[in-house]
Amino acid sequence: MELGKMQTLTVVKKVEFGVYLAKDSADTENKVLLPQKQVPEGTKLGDTLEVFLYRDSQDRIIATRTEPKLMKGMVTKLKAVQTGKIGAFLDWGLEKDLLLPFREQTKKVATGDECLVGLYTDKSGRLCATMKVYEYLRKDSPYHKDDQVEGTVYQFSDNFGAFVAVDDCYSALIPRKECYGNIHVGDHIHARVTDVKEDGKLDLSVREKAYLQMDKDAGIVMDAIESFGGALPFNDKATPEVIRREMNMSKNEFKRAVGRLLKEGRIEITEHGIHKK
């Protein structure tokens, strides 16, 4: 018998407050209680029932015929119904809410937040949720290079970038150099597949191919010029850090957009900035 999964067990004993279940009728030592309110009418010894095993509020292993929203091997979004001293508690469809410990949170979770989580057994033998779902995600996605995908950002690394669960189940990464704009844990993003790794993981970009992105970037630059009163206080020789901070673009993307506007005769470049014509 395994916590966290649906499994078929055999009725080996009947009592006033329920029935006891085991892996088979011969195994009467390792048994678990299914409370009476969960027992189907007419159940008799030797019958088999499909149940989910977890620990109740007294930490006793108990069976339920209710299928929870999350089981081992799955990743799904659950809502936080309250927070406490040891973490957040998530609604997973059972009487006892599921604990998401602070150490398993990739951002601080507040009541009402939806969290993408997996299920694991902690050192005390209790089922808990984790937002660190990297090892729970699949690597057999149907996607190819240049496909458009949807996903949830579940973790952020200053070294690697934003980790994404495409379709909330496939492993993907927006590399650090592609992390434009404000990308946060919990964000739902639309992205383009830039690479499919040998192990099946996906690399993503939130930007289009260069020739498609150029028109959008040119519009962004013009909007920025307008917001600065018709004169941007830096030009295409500015440092990559300044350009990324102010425009959410790489230096090459900024230069391509400025080049497009220059060719169209909409701007002029000076030593100290870019001016609208």
Image (spheres, rainbow, N blue to C red):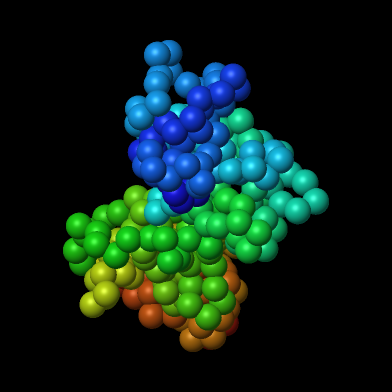
- Residue 118, x across and y down, in percent: 49, 54
* Residue 192 to residue 28: above or below: below
Nearest the viewer among 181 and 34 is 34
* Residue 66 to residue 133: above or below: above
* Residue 106 to residue 237: above or below: above
Q: Which quadrant of the figure contains the C terminus? A: bottom left
Q: Is residue 130 visible?
A: no
Q: Determine the image quadrant of residue 173.
A: bottom left
Q: Residue at x 35, y 27 (%)?
A: 47
Across the whole image, how many numbered discs are drawn on residues?
Answer: 0
Tell me if 37 is positioned left or right of 266 in this view.
right
Q: Residue at x 53, y 62 (%)?
A: 132
- Residue 206, x across and y down, in percent: 38, 62
Q: Is residue 103 visible?
A: yes
Tell me if 11 is positioned left or right of 109 in this view.
left
Nearest the viewer among 145 and 215 is 145
Tell me if 199 is positioned left or right of 25 in this view.
left
Q: Determine the image quadrant of residue 56.
A: top right
Tell me if 66 is positioned left or right of 126 in this view.
left
Nearest the viewer among 258 and 3 is 3
Q: Residue at x 54, y 85 (%)?
A: 239
- Residue 242, x across and y down, in percent: 57, 78
- Residue 213, x across and y down, in percent: 31, 64
Q: Residue at x 55, y 48 (%)?
A: 115
Furthest residue toward top: 41
